[in-house]
Image (cartoon, grey):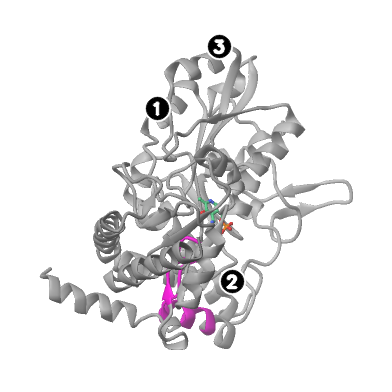
Amino acid sequence: MAFFAYLFFMQDLRAEFPFFVENPGLCYLDSAATSLKPKAVIDALVRYNRAESVNVHRGVYALSQKATETVEAVRAQVVDFTLAQRENTAIFVRGTTEGINLLAHILTSPESELAPFFTSFASPKKPAILLSEAEHHANIVPWQIVARRHGYALFYLPVNKEGELQISKAWLETILATHALRIIALSLQSNVTGIIHDLAPLRALAHEQGSIFIVDAAQAIVHARTELRQLVPDFAVFSGHKIFGSTGVGAVVGAKPVLDACTVYQGGGAMISLVEKEQSQYLEAPARFEAGTLPIGEIYALGAALDFAKKHEQAIVENDAELTAYADECLRRNNIGFFGDNTTRRSAIYSLRLDGIHAHDIGTLLDEQGIAIRAGHHCCQILMRALGVTATARASFSVYNSRDDVDRLVEGLRYVRKIFRKSA
Ligand code: PMP
């Protein structure tokens, strides 16, 4: 597309987000925390609550059946959008955090029968889980809880000072000499640096060791869908709110036969076939993992969000590349450092390095100029330690951002630097 046609197209796309009408002039650079919602998504949420506000999987009346059909259609859409392998299904959860808690629980429980699918589960060696230092707390703490409960060892792939994964064969061989690597759980894209990790060698390791390979796709779902699909993980987990959807819903995607061999997570209504006083029988996956009433309106909205993401996939990918190239250039020209500067595969999430200026001061001074970024450890304390900082100021872009937003950020950062030079 010619450059000006592209600009007009992107302006039209931005107009689909009512947030900018409600918050005129705000430069929103916190999409890694949560993305804005297009009108179609808000409309879907409202449509459910206004016109189809009934429960699913229970009612015999037509409207309940219609709502059930919508929910099941979104489930199929989630599988199709993420890992479209024939055996796969999707479990609706609150988001990535709940999804990883669910997997941690069911995949380490002695009641699950996973040896027929993953040979590491038949090994007499001490069971282990492999994570990395780049993980979000959502992909660390649930594993710590179950590791302690079931006697698993936890290992962390190290990262270098830029936040890139360091895969050492010798290091892995030492672990494998004494441990059966049952689970490898890694984020495909960092929410701190925007680095899209090359997980292919770890995918190969999982195949070789008969391990379960899980991808935290919270960020990658928007920025690296192609890589996600190429990896063919056993499970992928994401949150709807990071991909233009509502908060309150996300999904775990994985093979139904494996899930059927797993013990249940939460108990309650809608996940059983028979309840007796002493025990109950459970439904098959995914229903057995969906106790209680689903977030139905949010699922409607997720369907609209995935439609939006699919329809505008090319624009999302092109704008990401365009803004990354432009921001890289502008930041470098102004001597503003950022983590992952030398990494080849990365997209528009920047953890900035303004020496001697605290991340929170940067955030506050930018806020005064109408620029919303995030400052803190970004739920990645282990990564912060590896990078040698306690916090970073993070600016993250999405499809509704443009070069103007990059210019405003850089101007804002120049102002921050000026203030601090004066007061120094
Ligand atoms: N993993 C990564 C990489 C993330 O960026 C996030 C959200 N910042 C999460 C997990 C947790 O997502 P949620 O809070 O939606 O459960």
Q: Which residue is mark 3?
A: 177
For residue 128, side relative to residue 337 (left or right): right
**Quadrant of the rendered structure where residue 60 is?**
bottom right
Q: Is residue 68 visible?
A: no
How many angstroms separate mark 2 from mark 1 (CA)? 38 Å
Q: Which mark is residue 204?
A: 1
Label located before the other in sequence (2 or 3): 3
124 versus 315 height, above or below: above
What amino acid is labelled 1 in the image? Ala
Residues in magenta? 27-46
SS at circle 2: helix
Residue 76: x, y in percent? 44, 59
249 versus 272 height, above or below: below
Q: Nearer the viewer, residue 78 or 353?
A: 353
Residue 418: x, y in percent? 41, 66
User: Badge 3, how many Cα within 10 Å: few under 14, some, many 20+?
Assistant: few
SS at circle 3: helix
